[in-house]
Amino acid sequence: MAYDEALSAYERFDFSDGRWSRRVYHRGSGPAVIIIHEMPGLHPLVVRFADRVADAGMTVFLPSLFGEPGRRVSNAYLMGVLAKAICVRREFSIWASNQSSPIVDWLRALARHAHGACGGRGVGAVGMCFTGNFALAMMTEPSVVAPVLSQPSLPLGPRGRAALGVSEGEVRCARERLTQEDLTMIGLRFHGDPVVPKERFETLKSTFGDRFEAIELDPADARETPGRPAHSVLTLHLRDDDPEGPTKKAEARVIAFFRERTGAA
């Protein structure tokens, strides 16, 4: 199956920007929020987060960029998709310190489409892990007003620990918009996450100042997943059984941020 029951409530369409075409799942009403899944794909816990955003009064758009929509996470599945993504360099810039992934152009086009279809003050966007920095790069699209970087993992490699994986022009545009339009962005990570170095968050803090809201969590507060360090703040390592815990508060903050910025509140 291309998708399981986690996506059964979602409508789907193929969206093209003239260069690439990708399947997009969507549901809800109100202003748009684009939720860009993490490795290894659009798995059920990404959909769970999207359901909560939709239930809070927004229309969620879930593009499928890699992997099999609806398939549950396993180590073998994760490694297979990661290896394939690293090889597909025409769409993803894995190692580049000052260049965003080409697929971000497609995401900007999707944001324009979503804003035109749903209205509101603008579009929210959250990238996760492999796609975490995409929400920052998307700010060159004027409709994107609520960027969230959840455990931004690119660029990979020890030489890019402090890098953001976006171009200087994208950083400059984001800084100007954050100030001129009175916007902010959110970043989330667990302390000690080996693929989201503290140096990267220090760069975000020094570059964007008080326009960047850093949510950094103790890994002791993460949901336990044997063999995997605390990483996925809004999905795999969210403690859904602890409604007053730090990870649930982080989830609530992100959803409130989307509501406020897009005009759903």
Image: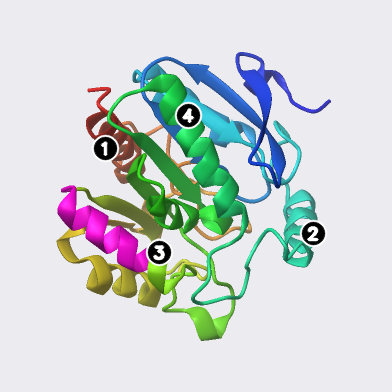
Quarter of the rendering occupied by the C terminus: top left
Residue in the picture at 27% in, 22% down: 264
Instruction: Say what amino acid the circle numbered 3 marks.
Output: Glu
Residue 170: image tag: 3
Q: Quadrant of the N terminus?
A: top right
Q: Is residue 52 visible?
A: no
The crowd level at tag 3 (other Cα within 10 Å; few <14, some 14-19, many 20+) is some
Give the magenta part as a residue range. Answer: 170-182
Q: Amino acid at mark 1?
A: Phe
Residue at 53% from the left image edge and 41% from the top image edge: 109
Residue 224, label in figure:
none
Residue 178 included in the magenta stretch of the image: yes
Query: Where, by quadrant of the figure, is residue 212 drawn?
Result: bottom left
Answer whether residue 50 is magenta in the image.
no
Please give left or right for residue 83 compared with residue 201 in the image. right
Number of numbered discs overlaid on the protein picture: 4
Q: Compare marks 3 and 1 and give the one earlier in the sequence.
A: 3
| Residue furthest to the right | 1
Numbered disc 2: secondary structure: helix
Q: Does label 3 or label 2 sit earlier along the sequence? A: 2
Query: Which sits in the foreground, 100 or 211?
Result: 100
Mark 2 highlights which residue?
A: 84
